[in-house]
Image (spheres, rainbow, N blue to C red):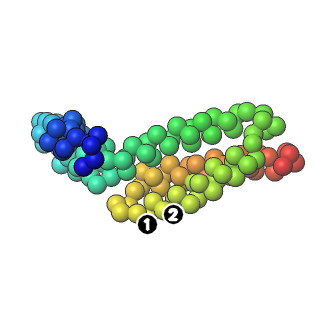
Amino acid sequence: AGPFRKPRSESSTMLPSVVPQIRSFVMSSPLVKSNPKLASLVDSPAGPFTIHFWAPTFKWCITIANIADLARPVEKVSTPQQIAVTATGIIWSRYSFVITPVNYTLFSVNVFMAGSGIAQLKRKFDSGQW
């Protein structure tokens, strides 16, 4: 320990993680206790108390925005962006089956992401505006 570093016992304490406490509260609720399928979903390794659930959930925002962009004029659609969206969707669709736990939510969002990117690229190709 250097002259400016406090010993561990004097340093500020870290707050305990709130996620395990919330998870415990939810798992002990009567609704979850009485429904085995819901309990299995909540307690899953890719369930709502893990990043494996929330990352794909928020990725849907990008996918939905890209699907909404199908209504935009084709001249305003960026070819490099759609190539990136398509590649991301394809790569992460594969990766969702390689990681542990296998993440079907990640797979589904990336299939739609790749599909929306392919649809946008087809629009650009059909219009001749590469």
Whether residue 34 is visible: no
Residue occupying image coordinates x 33% and y 52%:
46
- 125 above or below 77? below
**Disc 2 on helix, strand or loop?**
helix
20 or 11: nearer the viewer: 11
50 displayed left or right of 8: right
Outermost residue, bottom direction? Answer: 98
Q: Amino acid at mark 2?
A: Arg
Residue occupying image coordinates x 39% and y 43%:
54
Outermost residue, right direction? Answer: 128
Q: Amino acid at mark 1?
A: Val
Identify the disc placed on residue 98: 1
Image position, residue 2 (x, y; %): 28, 47
45 or 41: nearer the viewer: 45
- 100 above or below 18? below
Residue occupying image coordinates x 63% and y 56%:
87
Q: Quadrant of residue 100?
A: bottom left
Identify the disc placed on residue 113: none
Badges 1 and 2: C-beta atoms under 8 Å apart?
Answer: yes
What is the crowding at mark 2: few (fewer than 14 residues within 10 Å), some, or many (at least 20)? some
119 displayed left or right of 27: right
Image position, residue 65 (x, y; %): 60, 36
**Which residue lies under the disc numbered 2?**
94
Q: Quadrant of residue 127?
A: top right
